[in-house]
Amino acid sequence: MHYRRLGRTELMVSEAGFGGLPIGGLRWGDVRDEESLAALQRAYDFGANFFDTADVYGRGHSEELIGQALGEVRRHVLIATKAGIDFYRGEPTRNNFEPAYIRTAIERSLERLRTDYIDLFQLHNPPQKLAKEAGLWETLRELQAAGTIRYFGVSCRTANDARAYIRAAEANDDPRTFGDTLQIAYNLLDQEAAAKDVFVEAHRHDWGIISRVPLASGALSGKYDAAHKFPANDFRVDWSAERLAETSRRVEALRFLETPTRTLAQAAIAFCLSQPAVSTVITGAKTPAQVEENAAASDHAPLSEEELRQIQALS
């Protein structure tokens, strides 16, 4: 496993991180806690030290599993979580970025994670207008000063949201007003973040970039063709036949990235790591075998210039 500095923080994070969404269990097919715990342990054994989750993943269950699995090695790992999607009042969930709510949400996350501090706290899909809510950012700085959170940042819903926070920081007297990190979707099938210069601007200002959904919700594992049937408890069952067919066609065009020693999934993760601004790539995993494959991607990054040229031509 290789490591990179997380932007302008002092944290050194594993290139292949662990994404905690699937182990939350909601609409991710069959998920067993025993396998989830084994996957978390295997990730740690293979050198992953960055574990990303959110309070809403499984309505707290993902955080509970991470706290259970990593409690004994807490000082050797970096835990990132998020809040801002209020599920405590039942369905449907709603956005809630009120300072008092964020404080309460963090306290509950700490309990589930079995820790007294969070290495990286992220606002979960905040709207662009939240950049003007001075009280919220002051609250996060107070929690940082108290040691409750070491660093904070923004998990962005879209590339445009990421650009908005970068621009807002540039216009502010304190460039760290909105924290030090940005989390953004990026993969071989969705390169909007690069196309809109999020990485260029982030790298210029030394924001730490956390790249999520590198496998496009499993599509880039290469396991699903146009005729695949997802189970009823898997959110991908809602994908239309047209979407499945188009996704399958695009994935097949990327098969040239497979080699005898590198899977398509590993190449997909390595593609994200080919961006200098990206500090870590978080991949959701439900089994130890998936963790092993993902972790090995660190040894295959970056992709060659020729491979990147071919990918650009396809795009």
Image: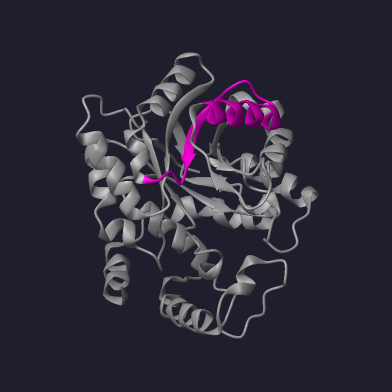
Q: Is residue 142 above or below residue 70?
A: above
Residue 3 location, x and y as percent? 44, 39
Of 76 and 83, the residue lying toward us: 83
Q: Is residue 254 above or below residue 245?
A: above
Which residue is rendered at x = 56% and y = 66% of the image? 218
Residue 99 location, x and y as percent? 49, 27
Magenta span has 186? no
Which colour scheme appears in the figure?
one colour
Q: Is residue 40 above or below residue 254?
A: above
Residue 137 visible in the current orientation: yes
Of 279 and 305, the residue lying toward us: 279
Which residue is rendered at x = 33% and y = 36% of the image? 131
Magenta span has 112? yes
Residue 229, by quadrant, is: bottom right
Residue 53 visible in the current orientation: no
Which residue is rendered at x = 26% and y = 61% of the image? 195
Q: In this picture, which residue range is highlighted in magenta?
A: 100-127
Residue 49, by quadrant, is: top right
